[in-house]
Amino acid sequence: MRFKKAEYHPGDVNMSKVITSRRLLPPPDISVQMNDQRKESPPSEQEQASPATTHRKLMRRVALIDGIGVLFVLALAALWYAADVLLLLFACVLCAVLLQELSEIVQRRLASAASSAWRSSCSCCCSSWASVAG
Amino acid sequence: MLLLLLILGLGSWLMAPQISDQSSKLAETVPKSLQRLREVVAQHPLLERIVAELPSPEQVSKQLASLIPNAGLFFGGLVGAIVNVVIILFVGIYFAASPTLYIEGFIKLIPQGRRTRIRDVLHQIGRTLARWLIGKSLSMLIVGVLTASCLSLLGVPLALILGIIAGLLDFIPYFGLIMADVPAVLIAFSISPHLALYTILLLTAIQLAEGYVLLPMIEAKTVSLPPALTIVMQLLFGSLFGFAGVALATPLTAALSVLVGTLYVQDVLGERRGLEA
């Protein structure tokens, strides 16, 4: 279907899109028109599919769902058998987190102690220099 | 990190002879105390039913000996328990020495679009666990020192090892201190029933002080978990994985609550704030 440039036909989807994009008219009900077009258009390949194809698709979907289910059960079984190792690993992670946090606390304390010592020694030096200079 | 390990190693090396001596004495004393308790209780006809339900001293010593080796971690047996501790320490030190290496290695397995979010979630879990662990360590230290000093003031023998047991078992919320009370009361009972009564009163007072004074103060600055959720998770993990499940239930709950709060409540349900942990 071809239209003239400036003409507007009510119900024309493309033209109404142009107009609504310029905020002139509210958008037409596209779904109704699409349904109309579907009714008019010839049946697609999917609709023409034979019962054998449909059956094959259904079987594929069932196999996929079964596979996901089996994988889920296998994952649960693996989790169950590896629970001891996973708990051990979690204990290792807890130990690591605790060690790191404690070392950060010690580091912070040492840094603050060192900085205060540095500041006091620096002030001593400054005052002695000032007295010497004075 | 090296300084910290040095302090920890030196402390445990200095304490080791006393601890090993007292723990061997404890293993001898507890079954004898239980035998004495059975004899005393059997004199009262109303309590005979309770005596029938009590385990024999041999059973108790067997269960005590198998509690830690069969904790539910990977290696079983007494040697396995030591191997578990060594693995936890060494792998923990490796993880703590260069955490970025392992975190970034794990994040490389995630699709690129989700990496920032997963990194953020991992950091949140790390922060939550760190705060919980610091709070719990503080609580364990206070409970252990308080128990040991109060028991020694009361005149209960083996106060040091009983304090250490109380401090270590305080890692398990709610059930831990009850488990720690049993040997202390039994040992006190082996000396006199009055001392056992005073010990029960003292341990109850320590538990109440911990529950109503110490924990709220610590949890205000660290992490607080709903009590019912913690107990349910302890029962669940305990029935699934044994003693290790009970011991690790609370940190697992804290980590899981962060995971559910971020990946489900925030990302899927679209809430601004996740679960409070």
Image (cartoon, coloured by chain):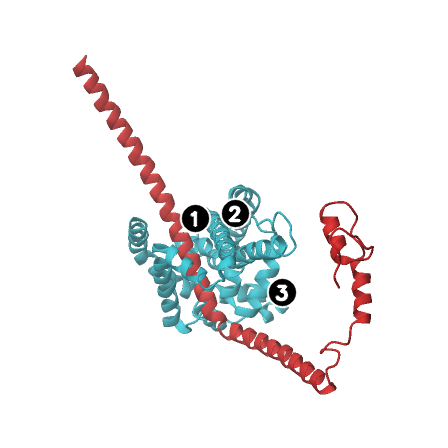
Decide: is B115 above or below A47. above
Query: Of the numbered discs in the image, which one, if any, rests on residue B47?
Result: 3
Which SS class for mark 3? helix
Query: Of the numbered discs in the image, which one, if any, rests on residue B141?
Result: 1
Tell me, what hue is chain A? red
Which of discs 2 and 3 lies nearer the camera? The answer is 2
Residue drawn at point x = 31 percent, y = 31 percent: A116
Residue drawn at point x = 27 percent, y = 27 percent: A120
First in residue order: circle 1 vs circle 2: 1
Total count of labels: 3
Name the outermost residue toward the left.
A132
Instruction: State the image coordinates of residue B158 (x, y, percent, origin top left).
Output: 40, 55
Residue drawn at point x = 49 percent, y = 67 percent: B35
Image position of B76 (left or right of B216): left
What is the crowding at mark 1: few (fewer than 14 residues within 10 Å), some, or many (at least 20)? some
Q: Are marks 1 and 2 on the same chain?
A: yes
What is the crowding at mark 3: few (fewer than 14 residues within 10 Å), some, or many (at least 20)? few
Measure the C-alpha gap from mark 1 to mark 3. Answer: 37 Å
Instruction: State the image coordinates of residue B167 (x, y, percent, origin top left).
Output: 45, 53
First in residue order: circle 2 vs circle 3: 3
Decide: is A116 above or below B158. above
Label 1 amino acid? Leu
**Contact between labelled residues 3 and 1, with CB atoms less than 8 Å apart:** no
Instruction: State the image coordinates of residue B133 (x, y, percent, origin top left).
Output: 46, 51
Measure the C-alpha gap from mark 2 to mark 3. Answer: 28 Å
Which SS class for mark 2? helix
Q: Nearer the viewer, residue A133 or A55?
A: A55
Q: Name the residue under label 2.
A: B206
Tell me, what hue is chain B? cyan
Decide: is A98 above or below A130. below
